Amino acid sequence: MTAKIVVVGSFNMDLTSYMPRMPRPGETLHGTRFQTGPGGKGSNQAVAAARLGADVTFVGRVGTDIFADNAFQIWNSENINTRYVIRDPENPTGVAPIWVEETTGQNAIVVILGANKVLSRQDIDSAAEAIARADILIAQLETDIDATAYALKLAKQSNVRTILNPAPAATLPDEMIANADILTPNETELEVLSRRTLDDIDAAARSLIRRDDQTVVVTLGAGGAQIVTSKNSINKPAIEVQPVDTTGAGDCFTGALAVALGEGKTLEEAVRFANTAAGICVTRPGTATSMPSRQEVDVLIPE
Ligand code: RIB
């Protein structure tokens, strides 16, 4: 069964510099290489889901500049439906300068959201029909929060399962959290969203749960993912890899999770699938371009 996924989200052009270590404030450091490529949490999740075999529709805003052309290039090459993407003449396409430390694969990112920030309720309403037909709606926090919250609400009203990747870290209105069936924060995002310290991950995750059928899946990098419900907590380990660039790994995880759930897999099976996809993603440089194919994941997925 092919999963039908709608991603409401961002596109950014990623401007990535690789370096032996992160520079300190006031320091000039020699980098080793520079790469531009398609990114943005929403678009990365859409590309991940499409490469893993889903039927994907993207809802978002880009500018009318050359970076917007790059966005359509990748979406078209991955067969992502762009009918609900608006080219905004008044705002530039989002950009994201990224630093990647080569020794660890860790990154630091600045996002300048541009057109992503003016996604509106009206834009979501135009895509209402596609949202109602989806198996899963995915959202993140690089688009206008009111419009994003509205998309989650609309999806819930149409009985569509919702996944909110609460990234970048932010605090959110209660109703928005309640309209996410599954939340996929990393540790930093969990800390900010729950307003708690992380000495007890389960307690922090549980503080986000507003109803019994909600789940928080905390992504822990090399520590795998912690599936937390109101009653249980279980860890699913990561696959062992040598990370080269961790940028986009969380996006890969969320996109893959949506695909597996949309295909009818259980949550535990879906997390195992998503861990494997994200594990492959970190072994390659770049963001959208580092998303794995279905065949690559199927070969590596542990029994
Ligand atoms: O999650 C990685 C993404 O965060 C990058 O592609 C960058 O654009 C920022 O949105």
Image: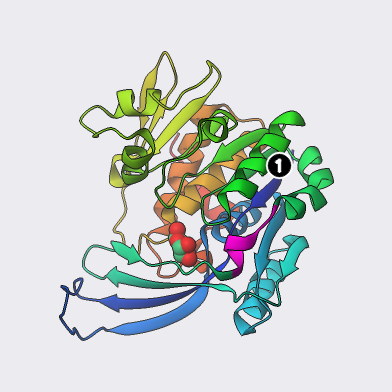
Q: Which residues are magenta?
A: 115-120
Task: Report whether 119 appears left or right of 37.
Answer: right
Q: Quadrant of residue 82?
A: bottom right
Q: Nearer the viewer, residue 117 or 214?
A: 117
Q: Amino acid at mark 1?
A: Ala
- Image point 29% across, 40% down: which residue? 223
Residue 301 in the image: state x and y as whole percent: 47, 42
Task: Report whether 230 appears left or right of 51.
Answer: left
Residue 242 in the image: state x and y as whole percent: 29, 58
Q: Nearer the viewer, residue 215 or 166?
A: 166
Task: Report if residue 5 lies within the magenta region.
Answer: no
Q: Is residue 300 visible?
A: no
Per the image, the residue denoted by label 1 is: 3
Q: Is residue 99 visible?
A: yes
Q: Quadrant of residue 286?
A: bottom left
Ligand 1 closer than 8 Å to label 1 CB: no
For the N terminus, the image quarter is top right
Mark 1 crowdedness (10 Å alpha carbons): few <14, some 14-19, many ≥20:
many
Give the answer, above or below, for where 37 lies relative to 8.
Answer: below
